[in-house]
Image (cartoon, rainbow, N blue to C red):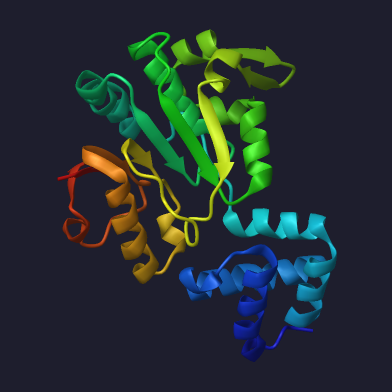
Amino acid sequence: MEPVAADYEAFKRRLKGTIGLDLNYYKHQQMHRRIHQWLQRVGAASYDEYIKRLQADPEERQRFAEYLTINTSQFYRDVSVFKEIEEKVLPELVQRYRRLRVWCAGCSTGPEIYTVAMILEELTPGVRHSLLGTDFDTGALTQAEEGLYSDNLLNSLPAKYREKYFTQEGRMWRLTETIRDRVRFRRHNLLEDPFDTGFHLILCRNVFIYFTPEAQARLTKQFSDSLVSGGYFVVGNAENLLEPEMADLKRVSYCIYQRA
């Protein structure tokens, strides 16, 4: 039986209290469709039935949260963007500040923040920058801390990084402890939790596309406020900030913005 659409608003309110995710900030049709597909997959006949299942089963809460937050990432994701980060953004920041604070929001299992860690290790060997990866999904963060990845996630990574910073374990690749030790991870809800400040570089890639325009505008301002003057904010290749100047940001390259 298909869940009654009129019950969806009540479901969203109860879901926020159950897993802490406020679906009002997400694009309605896209999220509604995904949830309906999930309920069909798990054989739930109604929103009420599924909420009760979530409240009673921690493992089901974790699976559902992982499904909703869509964890996809890759090392050196979007080659042209990371070339710009490697050849221009990070060298400029290192020259200005020496030790950097970098935040990857919605980091999934960690490939992008670890990519930054490898680039910085090449630029400034042995220097301990402050590198933070955050995500809503604790399962993804556990995988990030483990640092074990399938081959397909390394397809875009330049060979010099794979050869220097990975060892093969069967069909998987283990990131060296040197790089894993450079990054700390923690759970963070972009829509609810406060933002730290003083970052030189923030990456939040392929996350905005799931949010409403109102949520995007609010988050853009919060990210800008978290940057130092002249700091950089990087989004995904399918994302385009709405009125970035309202958040004191200017576009300087493909997917890359700088705080004025």
Looking at the image, the residue that sits furthest to the bottom is 6
Q: Position of residue 66 (x, y in %)?
A: 66, 53
Quadrant position of the C terminus in the picture: top left
Quadrant position of the N terminus in the picture: bottom right
**Res. 19 in view:** yes
The picture quadrant where one finds residue 200 is top left
Which residue sits at x=63%, y=83%? 8
Residue 172 located left or right of residue 100? right
**Res. 254 in view:** no
- Residue 188 vs residue 4, the one in the foreground: 188
Residue 30 located left or right of residue 90? right
Q: Is residue 88 above or below residue 259?
A: above
Which residue sits at x=77%, y=66%? 41
Q: Is residue 62 above or below residue 87?
A: below
The picture quadrant where one finds residue 77 is top left
Q: Is residue 137 above or below residue 10?
A: above
Q: Position of residue 125 (x, y in %)?
A: 39, 8
